[in-house]
Image (tube, rainbow, N blue to C red):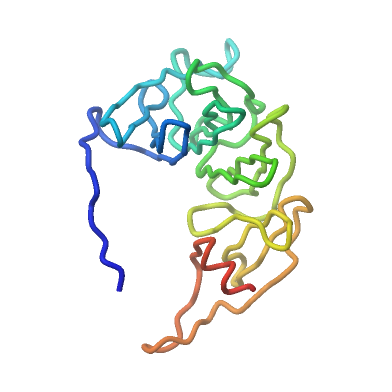
């Protein structure tokens, strides 16, 4: 059994995170989390907290004044800069440049809000995956235009795992009483496997995934 230990801890100086993600920069790892004024970062190597105000993506008359305050976010390093993608139940998806707080892309104000956000780093591609509470998964380009490039008729949440399989980007997860593998480029499932797993304690239903586990199971 692997012995786990707490390497370092820090007290959040402004309450708690609604969501967070991890990125690796040239200076080391960085935690990116939500904040009432936008986002914050924690540099664990230097014990440094920084608050980043994010510009409001709303057009005049479309939403509240003041900075954006996403409650669901994901982060990626794109061309050497940290890009945040996310939103909230009341705010459709947007992308920001973390250092400047400038809005890169903003979905139509009439779009669904964002309940869950995730990031997927692929060879030569960077994607954001988002989903409202009960609707399809949206796939967004994190570089280039930043626009929506696909949609899946399946919900995205933390029980699903995304990665590369046979040179194509996929999403693996529990959906409609079965486990499916979705092709992110095509927007359709191409494989399905049993939800039951035999264990020493009996048969258990598998409904949550980590990507390394999925690759081993599907290989």
Q: Position of residue 164 (x, y in %)?
A: 66, 57
Query: Does residue 71 lie above or below 6 as drawn?
Result: above
Front residue (pair 66, 129): 129
Identify the image quadrant of residue 111.
top right
Query: Does residue 154 lie above or below 97 as drawn?
Result: below
Q: Position of residue 143 (x, y in %)?
A: 67, 31
Number of callouts: 0
Task: Name the residue at 44% across, 17% down.
Answer: 67
Residue farthest top in this picture:
60
Front residue (pair 6, 102): 6
Query: Does residue 170 lie above or below 114 as drawn?
Result: below
Query: Does residue 195 lie above or below 118 as drawn?
Result: below
Front residue (pair 99, 209): 99
Q: Position of residue 133 (x, y in %)?
A: 53, 47
Give the left or right position of residue 182, taking residue 116 as reference. right
Q: Quadrant of the N terminus?
A: bottom left
Give the left or right position of residue 199, taking residue 8 as reference. right
Identify the image quadrant of residue 113.
top right
Residue farthest front in this picture:
26
Q: Position of residue 74 (x, y in %)?
A: 50, 38
Task: Name the residue at 51% across, 44% down.
Answer: 116
Q: Quadrant of the C terminus?
A: bottom right
Identify the image quadrant of residue 35.
top left
Give the left or right position of residue 42, taking residue 153 as reference. left
């Amino acid at each position: 059994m692997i012995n786990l230990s707490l390497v370092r801890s820090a007290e959040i100086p402004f309450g708690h995170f609604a969501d967070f993600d991890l990125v690796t920069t040239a200076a080391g790892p960085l935690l990116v989390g939500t904040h009432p004024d936008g986002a914050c970062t924690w540099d664990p190597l230097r014990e440094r907290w920084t608050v980043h105000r994010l510009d409001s993506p709303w057009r005049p008359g479309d939403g509240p004044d003041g900075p954006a305050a996403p409650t669901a976010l994901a982060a990626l390093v794109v061309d050497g800069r940290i890009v945040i993608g996310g939103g909230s139940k009341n705010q459709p998806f947007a992308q920001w440049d973390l250092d400047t707080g400038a809005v890169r892309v903003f979905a139509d104000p009439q779009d669904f809000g964002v309940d869950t956000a995730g990031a997927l780093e692929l060879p030569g591609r960077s994607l954001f995956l988002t989903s409202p509470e009960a609707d399809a998964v949206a796939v967004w380009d994190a570089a280039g235009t930043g626009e929506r490039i696909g949609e899946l008729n399946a919900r995205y949440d933390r029980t699903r795992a995304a990665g590369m399989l046979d040179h194509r980007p996929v999403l693996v997860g529990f959906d409609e009483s079965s486990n499916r593998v979705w092709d992110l480029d095509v927007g359709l499932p191409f494989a399905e496997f049993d939800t039951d797993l035999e264990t020493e304690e009996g048969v258990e239903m598998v409904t949550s995934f980590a990507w390394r586990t999925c690759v081993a199971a599907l290989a």
